[in-house]
Amino acid sequence: AGVVCLNVYRVRSGYLNIGTSLEQQIARMGELANRECEQLRDRTDTAGANLTVKCAPDLYHKPVPAILEQLGEESADLLVIGALGRRGIAGMLLASVTEQMIRRCGVPVLAVKKKGEAAGLSQAVRTLAG
């Protein structure tokens, strides 16, 4: 079985302030995203599965369409996605990517999170503030 570790990374608009082009920023952020995926791959027991790394830019701060596009390209049978576990007001303020994927994805979705990990109101406000 093959496993694709996909990192859809956000490309922030601040690159203009440091004098780089969009293409340079995509390349720079892509290198960082790729390094993160490779580190994950190196720490993961793949139990014989072929694990490949793939990174894709999210230029419009809308990761769900980017993830859906990549799923289609890979002909995926299952999506495993991380969840922050937002509760209360934080959960109501933010429509989570995980929740959107569960609703819109054409394949089964397995959502996982670290035990005891949850995002609170302050994290929701920081996320909404951009």
Image (spheres, grey):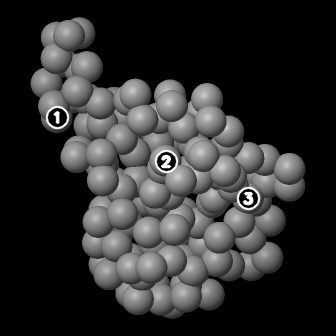
Q: Secondary structure at mark 2?
A: helix
Q: Tag 2: residue type?
A: Leu
Marks 2/1 in contact by CB < 8 Å: the verdict is: no
Q: Secondary structure at mark 1?
A: helix
Residue tagged by mark 2? 93
Residue 124 visible to an observer of this rendering: yes
Q: Tag 1: residue type?
A: Glu
10 Å crowding of disc 1: few (<14), some (14-19), many (20+): few
- Give the x, y percent position of residue 21: 13, 24
**Which residue ends up furthest to the top in the rendered image?**
18
Q: Secondary structure at mark 3?
A: loop
Residue tagged by mark 3? 113
Closer to the camera in the image, 7 or 82: 82
10 Å crowding of disc 2: few (<14), some (14-19), many (20+): some
* Residue drawn at x 37%, y 34% as measured from the top left: 29
- Give the x, y percent position of residue 12: 29, 30
* Residue drawn at x 54%, y 38% as measured from the top left: 124
Residue tagged by mark 1? 23
* Residue drawn at x 45%, y 79% as measured from the top left: 103
- Give the x, y percent position of residue 111: 65, 70
Mark 2 or 1 closer to N-term? 1
